[in-house]
Image (cartoon, rainbow, N blue to C red):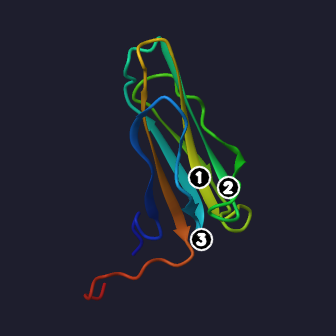
């Protein structure tokens, strides 16, 4: 029997942070998976900005410490209000894409007193080539 968690790996790419500049995740190794989804969230901005936006994109590289480049069509529709979320989906991992990904979330704030946006990013790697072995000793 297959469940939603079979063949899925969940990673915190960017922990919740009040930020006023770009936040970049560590390298995410996609080896062994066919697809990825990144969930970007923002909370309420602090410092009473007159306006703000949140942008996000995914970059890829052959090596974890190499030079990353943008993945075409992997940017969100700009977030322009508090308490919103967006998704980026990437297919063809390890066949049409490079092995390592990074998530970048960029808040841009105008006005206010040292304004910051509460942002976070989560990565889900899915459709694993081989599902994990169950830890249960009881046959299904």
Residue displayed at 71% across by 61% down: 97
| Horizontal arrangement in the rendering, residue 70 relative to residue 115 (left or right) | right
User: Label 2: which residue?
Assistant: 60
Indicate the secondary structure of the residue bearing disc 2: strand
Between circles 1 and 3, the one closer to the viewer is 1
The answer for how far apart the CA atoms under marks 1 and 2 are is 6 Å
User: Label 3: which residue?
Assistant: 31
Along the polypeptide, which appears first: circle 1 or circle 2?
2
- 52 to 76, vertically: above or below: above
**Residue 95 % position (x, y):** 72, 68
- 44 to 17, vertically: above or below: above
Residue displayed at 31% across by 82% down: 135
The answer for how far apart the CA atoms under marks 2 and 3 are is 13 Å
**Residue 102 % position (x, y):** 59, 52
Indicate the secondary structure of the residue bearing disc 3: loop
Residue displayed at 43% across by 70% down: 6
Along the polypeptide, which appears first: circle 2 or circle 3?
3
Closer-to-camera residue (5/122)? 122
Callouts 2 and 3 close, C-beta under 8 Å? no
| Horizontal arrangement in the rendering, residue 81 relative to residue 108 (left or right) | left
Label 2 neighbour load within 10 Å: few <14, some 14-19, many 20+: many
Residue displayed at 44% across by 31% down: 84
């Amino acid at each position: 029997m297959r469940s939603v968690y079979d063949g899925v790996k969940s990673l915190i790419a960017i922990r919740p942070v009040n930020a006023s500049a770009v936040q970049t995740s560590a390298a995410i190794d996609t080896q062994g998976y066919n697809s990825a989804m990144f969930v970007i969230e923002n909370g309420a901005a602090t410092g009473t900005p007159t306006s703000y936006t949140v942008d996000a994109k995914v970059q890829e590289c052959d090596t974890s410490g190499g030079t990353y480049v943008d993945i075409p069509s992997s940017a969100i529709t700009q977030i322009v209000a508090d308490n919103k979320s967006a998704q980026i989906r990437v297919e063809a991992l390890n066949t049409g894409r490079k092995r390592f990904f990074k998530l970048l979330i960029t808040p841009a704030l105008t006005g206010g007193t040292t304004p910051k946006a509460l942002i976070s990013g989560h990565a889900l790697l899915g459709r694993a080539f081989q599902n994990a072995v169950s830890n249960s000793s009881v046959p299904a």
